[in-house]
């Protein structure tokens, strides 16, 4: 079970909800849904989730990795300088059917490009 998904466009107005990483680079086990932005654990086990997000030209951004609607870790792209990168990772035991997503916490701008800069990765260990 493993996936990497990305966005290949930027936003200066994203301000709520789940970030939908609509470009799937890999999706072994088909646990990640690019239509909803949600990973659903195909089986129980210990998983690692990692997010990298670049804030858009001094538009502050904070995101969080949410597991079953509970915030686990947050990342920040601070607006003191343009295009700062925020990252974070969590290791968590999931039951089959548990759901993981990246959600908006604060701010409004993320940046990416045709070769992705803002990504969401997860894998079972």
Image (tube, helix red, strand yellow):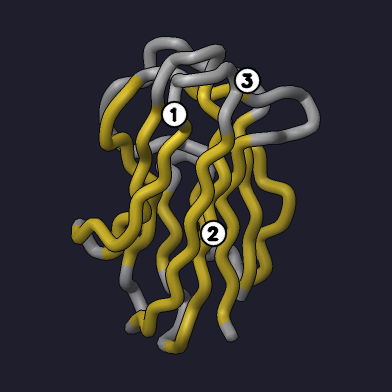
* Front residue of 100 and 81: 81
Q: Which residue is mark 2?
A: 50
Q: Is residue 123 above or below residue 46?
A: above
Helix, strand or loop status at disc 3? loop
> Looking at the image, which is closer to me, 40 or 109?
109
Alpha-carbon neighbours of circle 2 within 10 Å: few (<14), some, or many (≥20)? Answer: some
Mark found first going from the N terminus, 1 or 2: 2
Q: Is residue 8 left or right of residue 66?
A: right
Q: Position of residue 109 (x, y in %)?
A: 45, 19
At which x and y percent is residue 80?
A: 47, 20
Horizontal side of residue 23 vs 92, given as left or right: right
Q: Please state the horizontal and vertical placement of residue 36, each as a whole percent of the image.
A: 41, 42
Q: Which residue is mark 1?
A: 78
First reached walking from the N terminus: tag 3 or tag 2:
3
Mark 3 neighbour class, 10 Å CA radius: few under 14, some 14 to 19, many 20 or more: some
**Disc number placed over residue 9 in the picture, else none:** 3
3 vs 1, front mark: 1
Q: Is 106 drawn above or below residue 70 in the view shown?
A: above
SS at circle 2: strand
Image quadrant assignment for residue 122 = bottom right
**How far is mark 3 from mark 1, CA to CA?**
20 Å
């Amino acid at each position: 079970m493993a996936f990497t998904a990305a966005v290949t466009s930027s936003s200066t107005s994203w301000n709520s909800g789940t970030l939908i990483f609509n470009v799937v680079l890999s999706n072994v086990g088909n646990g990640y849904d690019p239509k909803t932005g949600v990973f659903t654990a195909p089986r129980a086990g210990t998983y690692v989730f990692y997010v990298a997000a670049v804030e858009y030209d001094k538009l502050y951004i904070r995101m969080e990795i949410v597991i079953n609607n509970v915030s686990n870790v947050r990342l920040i792209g601070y607006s003191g300088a343009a295009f700062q990168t925020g990252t974070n990772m969590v290791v968590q035991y999931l039951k089959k059917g548990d759901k993981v997503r990246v959600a908006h916490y604060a701010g409004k701008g993320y940046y990416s490009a045709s070769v992705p800069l803002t990504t969401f990765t997860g894998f079972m260990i």
